[in-house]
Image (tube, rainbow, N blue to C red):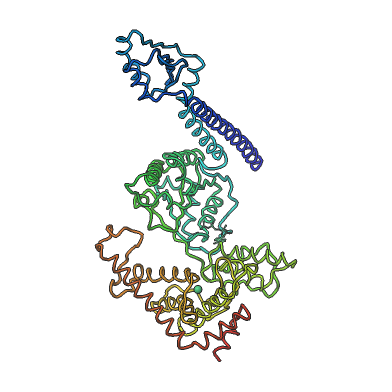
Amino acid sequence: MKEKRKDKDKKRGKLYSIIFTIVFLVIVGAIIGVYIWQNNKQTEENEDEIAYTDLIQKISNGEVEKIEMTVGSTSIKVKLKDIEEEKTASVPNTQAFIELIQEEVKNNNQFELKQNKQNPLLTVGSTFFSVLPTLLIVALFILIFKMQGLGDKGKVYGGEEDNDTGVTFKDVAGLDEEKNELIEIVDFLKSPEKFHEIGAKIPKGILLCGKPGTGKTLIAKAIAGEAGVPFITMSGSEFIEMFAGLGASRVRKLFEKAKKISPCIVFIDEIDAIGSRRTSGSGGESENNQTLNQLLVEMDGFETDETVIVLAATNRPEMLDKALLRPGRFDRRITIAAPDLHGREEILKIHSQNKKFEKDIDLKEIAGDTAGFTGAELANVLNEAAIIAARSHRKKISKNDIEEAVKKVTVGLEKHSRVISEKDKKLTAYHEAGHAIVSKFLPTQQDVKEVSIIPRGVAGGYTMYKTNEDKYYISKTEMEEKLIALLGGRAAEKLALDDISTGASNDIEVATQIARDMVTVYGMSDKIGPISLKTDEPYEMQPFGDHIGDNIGEEVKKLIDTAYYQAQQILSQHMDKLDAVANALLEKEIISAEEFQRFFE
Ligand code: ADP
Ligand code: ZN
């Protein structure tokens, strides 16, 4: 039923937008046509036209016999004394022109000024032209607002509404502590009177922090599902598009709707898009401010007996305006981390429910191989594996399918069709061999699982490492060695081919980020010490003065330079291995963990 209504709305929406587009195009077409026509007319008449300054000159010289003009038109007819046919001229400002020649008319009785009444048709024409720009703009606005209004029916304005999410806590794997924390919200939504009677205050706003795909939306939906209340959702990025004031009005509409259907859950995804720190800037930023201010007003506005709970998701809580986090607003924060080993297994269990597997598949093993994966990525792995199996006409998902799917999710799809020159291949081979060999000599780094020069996604090749148990802490040494491993690719290119390529750009990006975090987040630089320097905050807002910025750069550079030097050291001591692995890669394109190990026996 609901689907059908949505479909109908969609169709009607399409029809409207087509009609509006046609009307709009016709108006624009007409205007362009008229302008071209006018221009042509003017150029045709050009030979007979007298320039304005010439005209003035001629009038004061007494050469003009008669001037005929029409009210409202800047085009006038001029009859000169010594020429038979009439000429035309155009005056920039009729009123000023008449005033200018008034004297002449009085003094020179031979000079005649004839003022015609306006041609009614022309009146319409000129009025039309004078209001045309306004009309156009109005039409454009109507068009845009209509189009938005259309979205309104399904989405946009009041947010997307779902009366029954069909999701419960059972569908959310792991996250037991988080679920426990949120259970009270469910109770509150179910029987708010119980809480009011005793005077208990329930948070209005809860901030869910975590990487994309960690299940923030899922858990918010599950709260609605558990409590049996509607779920209204809107993404922060939807608030900031389009025109000034629209974002704020959408926020207002969203809350209007929520109050009307309360008890309910409002979920604002990507709240950082509107909720980042207010600035005194203009344009997009001030639009942002209006939206944020409206959100603050709404958060303060609804009373506790309006049973509306606002959940907001972000991956960058530190970016949020402090005002959003004050009591009575988003004063409760729940951080959702990527799942641990057990959590991953649970998530895999949930998403393998409707899939068939070969007997030797062990979800625990897959969980072990996917450290750092989010719930969304795990779901994706199983889905990709199913697709791979189906494509090769198998009824069950095999171990191989899973492995292939893991690779696909981490590094992208294999691209056999891409044509690669021998030179590029050689470069990639040395680059990947460089990573693999450098890591081999770094005690904290994982063992190599696979090295390949088959392009995948945007990568020309890849070096995969075995994953170990989940770790909660990473030591400084480990981070330093990670930098060395990352720069091993670039170092190998330089040593073996005495040239460097763009292929290392991602390595460099990752390495720089790690080095920066070491200095500014983890306090691992001796020079700066254990001080947190949030790099997204302007330096002037930090209590350490301007020069700290230079110091950060210096310290980051030192870390990177040292790592690059050490990568080169390791490789130049093992040039024979580098050549051997690179050559093997050129020959076979892919090397397994065992094959790689054999180079060192
Ligand atoms: P976020 O809102 O944090 O970006 P989502 O809630 O949209 O992430 O998660 C995307 C998908 O990933 C979910 O629809 C679900 O299929 C899967 N997923 C994520 N976390 C979990 C989890 N803990 N249990 C089960 N599935 C999960
Ligand atoms: Zn690399």
Residue 64 visible in the shown view: yes
Question: Which residue of the protein is positioned furthest toward the top in this rendering?
Answer: 109
Place of residue 83 in the rendered image (x, y in percent of width and height, measured from the top left): 44, 16
> At 46% from the left edge and 51% from the top edge, which residue is drawn?
311
Instruction: Judge whether 273 appears above or below 70 on screen.
Output: below
Place of residue 534 in the rendered image (x, y in percent of width and height, measured from the top left): 34, 62
> At 44% from the left edge and 85% from the top edge, which residue is drawn?
570
Q: 244 left or right of 540?
A: right
Residue 364 visible in the shown view: no
**The C terminus, quarter of image:** bottom right
Q: Quick one: 176 or 477, which is closer to the camera?
A: 477
Question: Which residue of the protein is positioned furthest toward the bottom in this rendering?
Answer: 601
Place of residue 579 in the rendered image (x, y in percent of width and height, measured from the top left): 54, 85
> At 55% from the left edge and 63% from the top edge, which residue is drawn?
375
Instruction: Judge whether 47 appears above or below 328 on screen.
Output: above
Place of residue 276 in the rendered image (x, y in percent of width and height, measured from the top left): 38, 52
Instruction: Judge whether 144 appears above or below 480 on screen.
Output: above
> At 60% from the left edge and 63% from the top edge, which residue is drawn?
380
Hey, which quadrant is residue 103 in on the image?
top left
Q: Quick one: 505 or 246, which is closer to the camera?
A: 505
Split into quadrants, the picture shows ligand 1 in the one at: bottom right
Q: Quick one: 173 or 444, which is closer to the camera?
A: 444
